[in-house]
Amino acid sequence: MITKEEVEHVGWLSRIEIDAKQSDSYAEKLNSVLDYFGQLDEVDTEDIAPTYHIADIVNVFREDEVTESLSQKEVLANTENKQEGNFKAPRIM
Amino acid sequence: MAAWTDISVIRQKITDSSAEEVTSSYIETIGKSKINGFTTLWDEAINVARKIDANGHDGALAGIPIAIKENISTKGLSTTCSSKILQGYVPPYDAHVIERLKEAGAVILGKTNMDEFAMGTSTESSYYGPTLNPWDHERVPGGSSGGSAAVVAAGEAPASLGSDTGGSVRCPAAFCGVVGLKPTYGCISRYGLISYANSLEQIGPLATNVADVAALMDVVAGYDHRDSTSINRDNTYSDALKDDVKGLKIGVPEEYFAEGIDEKVKAAVWDSISKFEEMGATYEKISMPHTKYALAAYYIIAMSEASSNLARFDGTRYGYRADGENWHVMASKTRAQGFGAEVKRRILLGTYALSAGYHDKYYLKALKVRTLVKQDFDRALANVDVLMGPTMPAPAFKIGEKIEDPLSLYLTDVNTVPINLAGVPSISVPCGLADGMPVGLQIIGKHFDENTIIRAAYSFEQNTDHHNKRPPEVA
């Protein structure tokens, strides 16, 4: 069971503001899904390795060569919040 | 023209008239649309068609109009994942598949509607409002690539690209009565596909027939170093267009006909399997015992990956930004206001499943169950050439019927998600109607053995007329 407080904590971890009024309804819907996930407890996974992806490849390297990339102008084109070639954001602290 | 048309017919029209005329006629058809399948039309489409006319129709898809899902990056053309948080975002680069399409002379018509960030089975969660099923406007087109399937079914584009994380190409293909392929993981570069659950998803083509799906695969599949999970393999998909299934061994997993399956869907699929038998194939009933756990494992993995992949949407570099006294507050408000309800639920659950104290119980457990599901496929496909079953357990449901109850929506994905967990290829082809709505037959193959499922699907099409059935309003 995920509690109202946990919903608010997870909201903070994922940077999604959830006010106290919403956390009850979130908890209810999330719990119905978590309840469904609980059925995996009945599967015996002793000695079973996890599968993170199915591609039969391990490390993919490329030559350390400088190639063309997007210009600063193109990269900044999608925001009004820029200054002197940088993205402009509110202070962190 | 426009209407329901094969690429071969369009090619002839282009030769007889021009790519410009063909593109114009599609734009005109889209202008009269009642289904809300397109979100944005490309204002360059006509110019591109003119250039192709001027250059002598050079390329495998010269002048062929194609619709593109909202989550595939198109340079200079809005790409929003049907989300408020990406409103106004115009990619500065093309996805690999778009580069390939342009090189082949295809004309990008515009972008198609989808469930927000591809999280859904109905295309109802889009910021642009729902897409309607061309067969019945009160019903959903399926999802998440609902727009890509609906525009093809409605004759607004001859073919399209969608993406399939847990059934998002096959489900709408089934619900709208068109053909849709989810290729083997690694087959098509994901460069430029906005990630939702990167270990599961593949871009896939949709069209009115199998040959057109193969033609698109010949163009968009192939190695790309910019996707580190891209696999280098040469294949010509259209080589598989042969009407021959003699000796083909079919496995029919009993779990794909589990409790809750619609009786008419079940009947249509079994009729299809009988048809294959008549055509010289053989089938055996098999069991894939971990299928019932695939759905829970899939959702845990998809949500966990989503919580990480969607962290980039924080209002800093593009899209929507809310006000806030510091970065954390700005980002938290941006994400609260910019994401829709289902996206937020999945990010929250994914974050929870990965958080200290719950990682082993949910995420790690799901990855282990994924291994068991994959082993089911390895075992089954060691003895048969393909697996067959219904793509969706029931035909398209009514708009509004399930959207308030997330779990009831998730449960409709029961036959499509195991395929993504295992990474194998799967194609959905029309195999009949149930109460006037299309039913999809799912044909699943071995890793990188697209050609066998394409051959089976093509043979089925040559010997039946299900794919010729059109929605009532489409000539």
Image (cartoon, rainbow, N blue to C red):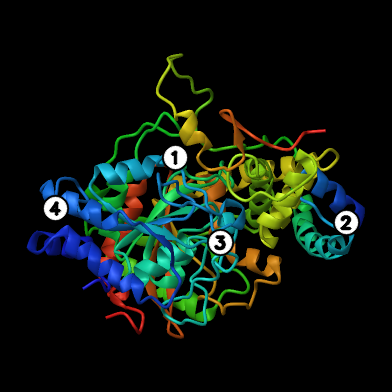
Q: Amino acid at mark 2?
A: Met
Q: Which of the two discs, 2 and 1, sits closer to the camera?
A: 1
Of mark 1 and mark 4, the one earlier in the sequence is 4
State the mark number for residue B372. Answer: none
Residue B51 relative to residue B431: left or right? left
| Chain of the residue displaying label 4 | B
Labels 1 and 4 positioned on one and the same chain: yes
Q: CA distance from mark 1 to mark 4?
A: 27 Å
| Residue toward you, B274 or A17 | A17
Residue B455 in view here = no
Labels 4 and 3 positioned on one and the same chain: yes
Disc 3 element: loop
Do the residues bearing badges 4 and 2 touch, measured as CB atoms within 8 Å? no
Q: Considering the image in quadrants, where does the N terminus of chain B appear?
A: bottom left
Q: Amino acid at mark 1?
A: Pro
Place of residue B365 in the rendered image (x, y in percent of width and height, measured from the top left): 73, 43
Of mark 4 and mark 3, the one earlier in the sequence is 4
| Label 4 sits on residue | B53
Of mark 3 and mark 1, the one earlier in the sequence is 1
| Label 1 sits on residue | B92
| Chain of the residue displaying label 2 | A
Query: Residue at horizontal 55%, vertical 45%?
Result: B200
Question: Measured along the vertical axis of the image, is residue B448 above or below residue B2?
Answer: above
Q: CA distance from mark 3 to mark 2?
A: 28 Å
| Label 3 sits on residue | B115
Q: Amino acid at mark 3?
A: Asp
Q: CA distance from mark 2 to mark 1?
A: 44 Å
| Label 2 sits on residue | A1
Disc 1 element: loop
